[in-house]
Image (tube, rainbow, N blue to C red):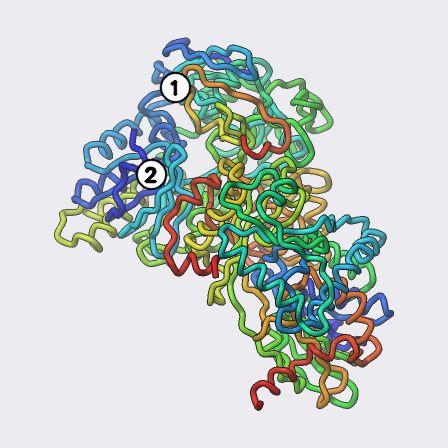
Amino acid sequence: MFKRLADSGKSVALTVDGRPVDCRAGDTVAAALLAAGVDRCRTTPVSGAPRGPYCLMGVCFDCLVTIDGVGSRQACLVPVREGMAVETQSGRREAGR
Amino acid sequence: MTQASDLAAHYDLVVIGGGPAGLAAAAEAGRAGLSTVLFDENPGVGGQIYRAITSTPVADRAILGEDYRAGSDLVAEARTGGALIANGATVWSLDPARLVGVSIAGQARLIQAGRVIVATGSLERPFPIPGWTLPGVMSAGGAQTLLKAQGLVPDGRTVMAGGGPLLWLLAAQILRAGGRIEAILDTMPRRNWLRALPHLPDFLLSPYAAKGVKLLREVRARVPVIRVAELEAVGDDRLREVSFNGRRLPADLLLLHQGVVPNVNLAMAAGVAHEWNARQLCFQPVLDEDFNSSVPGIAVAGDGAGIAGGTAAAERGRIAAVAAIRALRPSAPVPDLQIIRQRLQREEMGRSFLDWLNRPADSFRQPEGDTIVCRCEEVTAGQVRAVADLGCEGPNQMKAFMRCGMGPCQGRLCGLTVTELIADQRGTTPAEVGYYRLRPPVKPITVAEFASLPIAEGERLAVEN
Amino acid sequence: MRAMSEEYDVAVVGGGLVGAATAWGLAREGCRVALLDEGDRAVRASRGNFALVWVQSKGIGLAPYSAWTVRSSNAWAGFADLLRDETGFDVCFQRPGGFHLCLSDKELETRANALKRLHNQPGAVDIKSEILDRTQLIKMLPDIGPDVVGASFSPLDGHVNSLRLFRTLHTAIAARGVRYLPSHRVEAIAQEGGTFRLATSQGEIRAGRVALAAGNANMRLAPMVGLEAPMRPERGQIVVTERLRPFLHHPTGTLRQTDEGTVMMGDSHEDSTDPSGLTLGVSAKIVERALRAFPLLAGANIVRTWSAIRVMTRDGFPIYDESESHPGAFVVCCHSGVTLAANHALTVAPMIARGALDKSLVAPFSARRFYVQATG
């Protein structure tokens, strides 16, 4: 869906649902997902419909993912960090994680 | 990076939002010696218009344009002014006594402000079409953020739809960056010209006229533009096709945009009075000429005060800051307000023309049937209309009946649509219908963060007695 | 306005849960009903309730209130079924038994004494409540935190989706031909001949009977028909999380997980009648106690708070009354509009339809109890 204009910037390694994904310093988690071709980050807690990042500015809450074990984080507001474990979400979040 | 524990308990001025209005306000206030903190939720300052201005990987200046680069000067000015600039800082509460609730890296603090300038800017108007919740459908603003901040260009079959300056600017930026656009589906009714025309002379005198014409030409030369009266995103688990005028176009990415509206959540939760702007079809705060709101000590500057664009936002931020400086430190030197107001007036000149020309069609603001209105709670237009028919007169009763506006986005993506649907269904006006009542936290905070807030003895007794 | 010339059998004043349940019950009895309500920004307890169908602790100081509550709790499942048959909506009534969690030995002792008093009152009904220590409790609620020392439990306690109940009742009354009239604030009521004339902001409504179900506003309205409704409104705040997977299968008095997955936390009491404000520290205390009760909630996102004005009579017990000076005028007023909804729909409404309250059931709830105390 997206390609990088300039492949500059330091490489940062994270995992998405356990798979290694290479991204760039300066990416938000949402940008890293989209650059890696992951366009679905969760299914909704209401009907289970798939959703992906929509606004990229922190207002729509459609890009919620689990980051390092903490659920329902706004992927578009969180900068990537080396070794970060990102998980896509399925329906309602589990209490306690 | 600033941590929550680094913050003082009190600041003369708290500026909320690091776009042009917030940066200019923080620059003026810092220079005048007010203890000033600017909270911005994003990883870097700039707001949406100057998104990632200090870190963008887009090296070719021609791609994003010279207007974008103007943001650098504002950032430099704010940084030298002496204000503390805290990024990754989410303000989730502001009360009428100017107590500011902020979270940084999972730590919540309450900060007392002498004055507050809310510079939370705008967000894109909801664009509720069938299928707009499918992965692969994004807001144009979202795609622009990816371009500015990460240098990501749409790849594959991209369709853009809607209208308004941002859509055309983004189209040009994508093309300059080597991207491809299959089509632009223009949803703005042709008859908009009739109402825009009387404002054309003013527009021609504004800084936007020449730029706008050039931009349209640049895009139209390379992308087919099709005027559409209906639009649907079609797909199963993601977008597959865009349907319009009885045609179907295969697509990987659909970028939607039909203008921007003030981001009112924080100001409304603080108790700031708002009114319906019938020309811009949105709620905006009631403000005086210094951008002071109905709540003493709280000003709203920038596009949050009513849409006027990035350059105007900075001037508004300066005016609001001068008012704060005069209130808190009357002896401090301040810039000449007269000159700032003149600059602001010039910036605002072409706005009427743009507003009328880019007034979204009723059908794209007041959907029907199964089209989702509230993305969080998945409430449809048909459901909202049916409950309005039951006698539900306003969005707060609608919220109780349907849960629309009760999800994490707190109505940002459905509020205007719900208000307009109720007005349409009941034959009244959005001004009469009103808006959701908003309360803190205006952005979610965790149970642990909330529980860590200070609790006075009287407050404890209200729960444990 | 067509409504101005129309006459109704009953005008119900107040479009919240009490009014809507009463209106539905009246419509089931064949009455032509007008339901008069205020507008979108009205002070509405029904939008801010906690959705418990709650028995334990109700009636300390007035044993018949305990019995009245148990009656409604027992009627609730049937009430929910009737509503589902009429509207297709499931209001998610469940009665798995509920807990009152105690976070200190002192709280547990206070709780035990309160239930003892309830149980020992003359005329008390058995609510099968028991006091559980931590060891017993943790078997039923495995996620409780170390600060929870024990709880009281009653198998009669339950909960419901109260916002869906609100919508369901409005859907049901519309289907039964009840005329819902929003933005019809009642300014004055007069009785002429056998007819009540209600002056509203949008003209006059005429009806043979009038039922005042306007919550705290009954204080203003009741004297218009020769009745009294002494109230002492207070503000409560509620905090709500995002939707979570089911982890809590019983309601507690201050925290419950809804059928939609959100966790509601509540129960504060402030002397305020401003529903638009929010005292952050009070909500923080609510959340702090919730976190101590269930530490696994630490990372859950709070997405909403609200405050609402509790409908509270001066002694906290319901008022059901009929006017002697204005025959055909009734007051239906209580704090627990959810718990007692089944009674209002299935017991009180038929009394109003017949034109007289059944003293054997509701005599203890006359507002005369206030005058007796005042003069005595």
The three-letter code of the residue at mark 2 reads Phe
- The residue shown at (74%, 89%) is C192
CA neighbours of label 2 inside 10 A, class few (<14), some (14 to 19), many (20+)? many
Amino acid of disc 1: Gly
Task: Examine the image and state in which quarter residue B25 appears.
Answer: top left
Which label was assigned to residue B39?
A: 2
- C254 and B377: which one is in front? C254
Counting from the top left corner in percent of width and height, residue C295 is at 51, 39
Q: CA distance from mark 2 to mark 1?
A: 20 Å
> Residue B263: percent from the left, percent from the top?
45, 43
Task: Tell me if residue B359 can be seen.
Answer: no
Pinpoint the chain carrying mark 1: A
Classify residue A62 by image quadrant.
Answer: top right
Q: On the rendered structure, is B211 left or right of A40? A: left
Q: Look at the numbered discs 2 and 1 and tell me whether their residues touch, using CB distance below 8 Å.
A: no
Which of these two is toward me, B57 or C131?
A: C131
Name the residue rendered at 20%, 41% in the picture: B30
* Residue A26: mark in rendering: 1
Q: Label 1: state its secondary structure.
A: loop
In the image, taking residue B260 as reference, residue C335 lies left or right, namely right
